[in-house]
Image: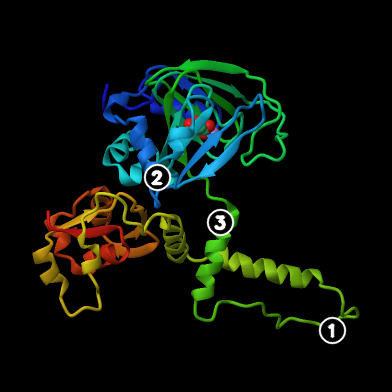
């Protein structure tokens, strides 16, 4: 079953037509979890590292006493933490653990740009983060031990006040399952869920990205701030007005038209901004563990030519944390890497996005290699 799609039991068409962003789905024994062996101690080790986002959540819903400790966690914290009622959550495992990246690749029935990360949690018996909702889709995969998941599509949204995390005050389960290794629960956004560790257990979450209008407009604002002479409000049709304090409907419409002009930019311009916005990523330029070391050796300003460097470091390797995607520009493709864009052919864009190591035919294109190195999506390596 190792390379089988996690959704093989129902098929992708049924999944997208009936469940995706519509309703929860539970599949018993959907995933072979042996491909991602991870000890609780290893996960705890990751939580002690500066560059890895992690949290410990202690407490129980009954006592309404959840508290969060943000990473990096001090190693000796685990000496005193006890064996009940806590959860450790570590994000972005796929960015620094190649086995986790391979595991996440089983979800390649979804567009890569829609996936945020693979998060892993370890919970001591009784551990939970309380009943809550998330604003994004999630696939929860039981990796080890038993966890009871309860869910509700109808619920009172009131939260417990004064906690570090958002936890529902009232929760009554509509469905529940005791999940064992390999079981998968898919939840669309805003379904209340409550996972309680019945014994020490580990759960992987494949989290999706649901880009908010606020984030998009923020990026768009930065983009326009960099444009030379961005369009401005103008009103050559202004007429004499009896009330100087009135902002009239013509002014409002001129603003609407100004904003429409920005949003309805020509196709290529809009795609270039959107592709770069969505490939910008919090970790994109962070070199995480086990990376080839030569990234710093490449400085485009330096006298040493890229050709010489490629003789010393013949491998151009993809960073695990890189965000790559491509958009169709008709005759060309727009390759997006960590917020930067490069116009190339469809074949080359497709090949680069799939490559762990660049092929010789791509290495010989120095403009492309420079782009990939400058974006931080690829690094040079000797072996
Ligand atoms: C967990 O793994 O404990 C929490 C995952 C979630 O509820 O989103
Ligand atoms: Co959740």
Query: To which residue does mark 1 refer?
Result: 240
Query: To which residue does mark 2 refer?
Result: 48
Say whether residue 33 is left or right of residue 315: right
Kind of element beneath mark 2: loop
Q: Residue placed at 52% from the left, 66% from the top?
A: 265
Q: Is residue 111 visible?
A: no
Q: Residue placed at 72% from the left, 38% from the top?
A: 161
Say whether residue 235 is left or right of residue 139: right
Of badges 2 and 3, nearer the viewer stands 2
Separation of disc 3 and disc 1 at Cα?
39 Å
Residue 244 picture location, percent across and down: 87, 80
Tell me whether circle 2 and circle 1 mark residues in contact (CB < 8 Å). no
Residue 217 picture location, percent across and down: 57, 61
Q: Earlier in the sequence, mark 2 or mark 3?
A: 2
Tell me whether circle 3 and circle 1 mark residues in contact (CB < 8 Å). no
Q: Around disc 2, counting alpha carbons within 10 Å, would you say few (fewer than 14), some (14 to 19), or many (20 or more)?
A: some
Query: To which residue does mark 3 refer?
Result: 215
Separation of disc 2 and disc 1 at Cα?
67 Å
Residue sitting at the far left = 311
- For disc 1, does the CB lie below 8 Å from ligand 2? no
Q: Is residue 150 visible?
A: yes
Q: Quadrant of residue 31?
A: top left
């Amino acid at each position: 079953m190792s390379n089988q799609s996690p959704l093989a039991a129902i098929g992708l068409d049924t999944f997208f037509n009936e469940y995706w962003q519509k309703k929860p789905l539970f599949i018993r024994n959907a995933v072979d979890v042996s491909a991602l062996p991870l000890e609780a101690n290893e996960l705890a080790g990751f939580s002690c590292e500066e560059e890895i986002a992690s949290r410990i959540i202690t407490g129980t819903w009954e006592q309404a006493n959840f508290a969060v400790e943000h990473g990096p966690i001090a190693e000796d914290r685990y000496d005193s933490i006890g064996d009940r009622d806590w959860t450790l959550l570590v994000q972005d495992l796929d960015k620094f653990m190649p086995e986790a990246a391979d595991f996440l690749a089983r979800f390649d029935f979804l567009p890569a740009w829609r996936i945020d990360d693979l998060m892993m949690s370890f919970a001591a018996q009784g551990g939970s983060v309380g009943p809550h909702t998330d604003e994004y889709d999630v696939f929860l995969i039981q990796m080890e031990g038993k966890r009871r998941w309860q869910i509700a599509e109808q619920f009172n949204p009131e939260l417990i006040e004064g906690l570090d995390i958002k936890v529902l005050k009232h929760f009554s389960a509509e469905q529940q399952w005791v999940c064992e290794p390999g079981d998968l629960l898919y939840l669309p956004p805003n379904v209340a869920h409550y996972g309680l560790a019945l014994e020490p257990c580990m759960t992987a979450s494949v989290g999706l990205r649901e880009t908010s209008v606020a984030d998009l407009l923020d990026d768009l604002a930065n983009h326009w701030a960099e444009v030379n002479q961005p369009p401005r409000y103008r009103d050559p049709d202004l007429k004499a007005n009896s009330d100087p304090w009135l902002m009239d409907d013509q002014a409002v419409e001129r603003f609407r038209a100004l904003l429409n002009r920005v949003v309805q930019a020509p196709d290529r311009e809009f795609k270039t901004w959107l592709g770069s916005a969505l490939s910008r990523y919090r970790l994109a330029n962070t070199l995480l563990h086990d990376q080839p070391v030569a990234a710093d050796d490449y400085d485009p300003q330096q006298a040493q030519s890229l050709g010489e460097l490629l003789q010393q470091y013949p491998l151009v390797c993809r960073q695990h944390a890189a965000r790559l995607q491509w958009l169709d520009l008709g005759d060309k493709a727009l390759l997006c890497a960590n917020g930067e864009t490069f116009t190339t052919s469809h074949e080359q864009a497709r090949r680069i996005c799939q490559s762990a190591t660049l092929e010789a035919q791509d290495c010989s294109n120095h403009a492309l290699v420079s782009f990939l190195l400058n974006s931080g999506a690829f690094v040079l390596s000797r072996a």
